[in-house]
Each structure stands twice: as structure tokens, then as C-alpha cells.
Image (cartoon, grey):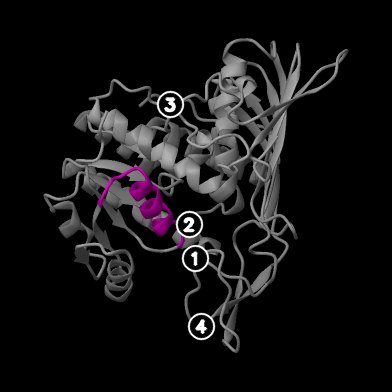
């Protein structure tokens, strides 16, 4: 199967845009065009050798390019809806960063437009494509763990630990009402829902902001980057959460709890998932991506290593390197895009494991339930409206 004839265009050149570009090229997919502000678009084009450049955020011109088959939207959240709808209208396939949009009203529009168009649309929940996650999904589906009793986990980072750490995600008008939950918590929730094959139906949330006020550099700072030495700051009130805790109920009857934080010193990008079943348990940590643990009551616990016989069920086809040759964060993007482009190339015949607009819509509805639960300090059901 060849996916090389397909060409990509990327809108947005911040932290995640180059991650998309690298993963595309590792799959042999040419990046034909890039769009951002003029200076940033031109700089990216020079650095990565991209032939078509669209400055002044003129993304609609990129959408008209006959050299672009698939559009990757890697801009701040507030642009996702308008860009997704425009790309669908232009007849392009789409890969959009998460969250899919700012609120469920916007995501519902994207779901309807994508259904009508019939093109391929993926939401970039890349954590699904760690081989350990795919193996866990297979284990649950085949009853290896038994009935799922409960799920425990966290997503912890420290890149916003200091009051001088800054990024557009801190601003509600750029990223939405929620920050830690929407930015990283949705990755965990989507991944666990994917593993269990069950949706989140109800939540109880407690959110908190440690830095009530932060210092914003007088100049922009890229994600996971620090302000330049000697930069001046302006103080502003923080309206989004630094950390939080969410109790969860799933459609299969399982319960769960999630801790999420962007002020956890020493945790750079740590996803932890523990699934407890009636037969055995399983747990995984993204900071040790090669290893999956299985827990037993009456016999020794088990350790499975990526790309060995104990690991292959469910993950075959999504591992390129031998055991001991670590496949981690960048490889999840490569595998996700491979799945997306194979789906396009085969007319939908390839197994569709990536998150769909419906999945993106679900995660935004969960976020809205989390925000309402925190505000009311009560259990809140996730809106079950049909699209």
C-alpha cells in the first residue's frame, strides 16, 4: 500500500507543527505547503524546504492549493473550528489538533460537516498509538483482564510550574475555559475510553489555580520554551486551572479517577494509566513506554516488553523498531498519520483507529461537564445529544 502520492499542508508552525512535519516525512509524505504569520511561515519554509508559503495566516489560499490533499491544523484552539469547516468545504482531508474546538456547539458543526463531506477527518489524540495502549485495548477487548472494575491515572507536567512560565494556553480566549484538563486531561480521557471501548458518562471535578496571578513576557513564548533572559513582564490574573482531580463513570459501568497538573515539579510529560479487572490488572507509564505490566493476585506479576511475543496482540503493524530500541512520543504521530493516510489511500478500508470528529466532540462535552461539575461541586452527566 502506498501513501506517498498524497501531500500535506500545515497551518501553524509553533511547537506541534514541526512535530507533524517530521512525522509526515518519516512516513514518506511530502509537506507541500505551510501557513502562519509571514515571518514564521517563511522561516519554517526555509528551515524545512517547503515549496509553498502562505503568510499573514492566509490559510484559505493554502486550502485552494492543488498540491495539498490533507490539511494539518496545528494552530491555537480558537482557530480550529473555522479552519476545520473551511478545509472540509474545500474538499480536503483534515488532521486537527485537540481539543477539536472551543465548545460543543462548534464541535457539533464540524461533526455534521465532516459527515456530509465524506472526507477523512482525524483529531490528533496521538497517545492512542503507543504500542502499549494498543496492546491494552486488545487485552480489554478479549477479556484478558476480566470485567473492568476501575481505572486510575494521571497526566502530569511541570512546564507551567513558575509564575513566569507563559503560553497562549493560559488565556481562555485562546484555549478555552479549561486548560490543564482540556490540554492534557483530554488525552488521558480519550486514551482510556479508547482502551475500554466505553464513553465517559458522568464526572465529578475539583479544579484549582495555584498561581492566581502570573507574569506574562512582553513578547510571545513557544510551548515548552522559556522567556529570554532579561525579558520584561506584565502581571495578569489567571482564569484557567493549574491542576485538578476528576472522578469518572464509564458507559460499561467502570469507575475511574484522574489527576492532572501542569505544575508538578519534575514531571515533564508523564501519562500513567492503571486498569483493574476481575481477572488481573495492567498498568503503563509513558515515561517508560517500552514496558507494560500485568498484575495478578495469586501468581507473580508479569512484565511485557514492546515488540516481543507478549506485546504483539493488537499492536502489530504499529511498531517499526526491535525491542530495546525505544519508540515514544514522536513515533505515536508517525503511526497515527500512517493510519490516517492509509485510510485515505484505501478509501476507508484500513482499520480506523484514530480519533474521529465524534470522538473530538465527545471530549469537548466531557470538558464542559467537568467545568460545570467544578462550578456546582456535584456529579454532572455528559450531554448525550445525538448528532
The x, y position of residue 173, in whole percent, is: 46, 61
Give the CA distance from mark 3 to mark 1.
31 Å
Residue linked to disc 4: 218
The x, y position of residue 85, in whole percent, is: 25, 45
Give the CA distance from mark 3 to mark 2.
24 Å
Q: Residues within 10 Å of mark 1 (few under 14, many from 20)?
A: some
Residue linked to disc 1: 168
Q: Nearer the viewer, residue 379 or 98?
A: 98
Q: Nearer the viewer, residue 306 or 40?
A: 306
First-in-chain label (3 vs 2): 2
Please state which of the two labelled residues, at mark 3 or mark 1, is closer to the viewer: 1
Please state which of the two labelled residues, at mark 3 or mark 4, is closer to the viewer: 4
Q: Residues within 10 Å of mark 4 (few under 14, many from 20)?
A: few
| Placement of the C terminus among the 4 image quadrants | top left
**Residue 175 shows which numbered tag?**
2
The answer to the question of whether label 3 and label 1 lie on touching residues, with beta carbons closer than 8 A, is no
Please state which of the two labelled residues, at mark 3 or mark 2, is closer to the viewer: 2
Q: Is residue 294 left or right of residue 316?
A: right
The answer to the question of whether label 2 and label 1 lie on touching residues, with beta carbons closer than 8 A, is yes
Give the CA distance from mark 4 to mark 1.
13 Å
Identity of the residue furthest to the right in this view: 298
Amino acid at each position: 500500500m502506498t501513501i506517498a502520492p498524497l501531500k500535506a499542508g500545515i497551518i501553524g508552525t509553533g511547537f506541534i507543527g514541526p512535530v507533524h512535519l517530521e512525522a509526515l516525512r518519516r512516513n514518506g509524505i511530502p509537506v507541500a505547503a505551510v501557513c502562519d504569520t509571514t515571518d514564521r511561515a517563511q522561516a519554517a519554509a526555509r528551515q524545512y524546504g517547503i515549496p509553498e508559503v502562505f503568510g499573514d495566516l492566509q490559510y484559505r489560499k493554502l486550502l485552494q492549493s492543488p498540491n495539498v490533499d490533507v490539511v494539518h491544523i496545528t494552530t491555537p484552539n480558537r482557530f480550529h473550528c473555522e479552519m476545520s469547516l473551511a478545509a472540509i468545504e474545500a474538499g480536503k482531508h483534515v488532521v486537527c489538533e485537540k481539543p477539536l474546538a472551543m465548545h460543543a456547539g462548534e464541535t457539533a458543526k464540524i461533526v455534521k460537516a465532516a459527515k456530509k463531506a465524506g472526507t477523512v477527518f482525524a483529531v490528533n489524540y496521538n497517545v492512542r498509538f503507543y504500542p502499549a495502549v494498543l496492546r491494552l485495548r486488545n487485552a480489554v477487548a478479549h477479556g484478558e483482564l476480566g470485567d473492568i472494575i476501575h481505572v486510575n491515572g494521571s497526566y502530569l507536567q511541570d512546564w507551567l510550574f513558575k509564575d513566569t512560565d507563559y503560553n497562549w494556553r493560559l488565556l481562555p480566549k485562546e484555549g478555552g475555559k479549561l486548560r490543564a484538563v482540556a490540554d492534557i486531561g483530554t488525552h488521558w480521557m480519550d486514551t482510556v475510553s479508547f482502551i475500554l471501548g466505553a464513553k465517559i458518562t458522568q464526572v465529578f471535578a475539583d479544579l484549582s489555580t495555584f498561581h492566581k496571578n502570573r507574569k506574562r513576557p512582553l513578547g510571545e513564548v513557544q510551548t515548552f520554551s522559556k522567556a529570554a533572559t532579561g525579558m520584561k513582564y506584565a502581571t495578569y490574573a489567571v482564569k484557567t486551572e493549574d491542576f485538578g482531580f476528576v472522578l469518572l463513570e464509564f458507559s460499561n459501568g467502570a469507575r475511574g479517577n484522574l489527576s492532572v497538573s501542569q505544575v508538578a515539579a519534575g514531571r515533564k510529560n508523564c501519562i500513567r494509566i492503571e486498569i483493574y479487572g476481575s481477572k488481573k490488572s495492567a498498568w503503563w507509564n509513558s515515561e517508560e513506554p517500552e514496558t507494560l505490566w500485568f498484575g495478578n493476585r495469586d501468581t507473580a506479576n508479569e512484565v511485557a516488553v514492546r515488540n516481543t511475543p507478549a506485546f504483539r496482540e493488537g499492536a502489530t503493524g504499529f511498531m517499526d523498531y526491535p525491542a530495546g530500541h525505544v519508540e515514544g512520543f514522536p513515533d505515536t504521530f508517525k503511526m497515527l498519520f500512517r493510519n490516517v493516510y492509509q485510510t485515505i489511500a484505501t478509501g476507508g478500508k484500513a482499520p480506523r483507529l484514530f480519533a474521529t470528529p465524534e470522538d473530538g466532540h465527545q471530549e469537548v462535552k466531557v470538558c464542559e461537564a467537568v467545568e460545570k461539575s467544578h462550578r456546582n461541586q456535584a456529579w454532572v452527566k455528559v450531554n448525550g445529544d445525538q448528532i
